[in-house]
Amino acid sequence: MILFVSPHLDDVALSCGGLVYRLTSADQSVTIATVCTADRPADWPLSEAARHEHQQWQLGDQPYQGRRAEDARACRLLGATPAHLDLLDAIYRQDAHGAPLYTNDFIGGAVHPYDWQAQLPQARTALAPLVQAATQVYCPLAIGGHVDHVIVRRAVESLAGRSAIRYYEDFPYADKLDQFNPPRGCAFEQIALTVREVDARIRAIACYGSQLSAVFGSAAAMPERVRGYVSRVGGERYWFVVDSTGAGK
């Protein structure tokens, strides 16, 4: 089984849809494991961050049922098996006293110390059996610094070790080239996508209708943005650790 680890219910389609489609079209077994998929406890107040995201998503006060359904459609289109790991998104998480961990600083801000103590061990526990069963693991580079991406990367590295991982470029954060510094000690493998594979990536992203305005400004703008990035980087790029001689580990 080939495992793609996704912090949220769209990250793998956004970043890796072409490769996933290629692998499943060649009868490879692919699982997309998404970490943050849980419904917010109904008695928890909405944080400022959650209210903002809910307004953009237009799926009501409990949007994750709709978001999981979007992911199921996208995975079906890509030929992958979804695994929803039932942890809370950063916009919902609270400390031991019920205070929100994040207001508007969950992208590019520091991971809250309470998250290192609580969310990271939970992510490791949920991911461990999948990582152990996988022949190859793909995880986010955490370009853009979203705290959920940072935690997921750390969890995967603690389970598999960096040398056993392929890192994907978090799109659309990676599209802001002035914010993307190639990781030190790594090289990349470039996957040149066919037209059919690019189209599959775009169709999969389109399944996440609640996210398109927030991510791209509009649904209509998404295909051109995806094609532009794919053209600029020559397909999809996957990073891996190299040793001092430049050989892949």
Image: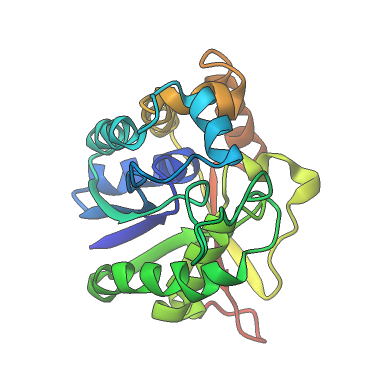
Residue 23 visible somewhere in the drawing = yes
| Residue at 49% in and 29% down | 54
Q: Residue furthest top?
A: 220
Does residue 243 lie above or below 102 as drawn?
Answer: below
Q: Quadrant of the N terminus?
A: bottom left
The image position of residue 138, as x and y in percent, is 42, 61
Q: Nearer the viewer, residue 171 or 214?
A: 214
| x and y, in percent, of residue 213 in the image | 55, 21
Query: Farthest residue in the bottom direction?
Result: 244
How many discs appear?
0
Res 225 quadrant in image:
top right
**Identity of the residue drawn at 26% across and 54% down:** 31
> On screen, 171 above or below 183?
above
Left or right: 184 as drawn, with respect to 10: right
Q: Is residue 243 left or right of residue 194?
A: right
Residue 189 in view, yes or no: no
Towards the viewer: 181 or 106: 106
Residue under the point 63% across and 28% down: 228
Image x and y of residue 40, in percent: 37, 45
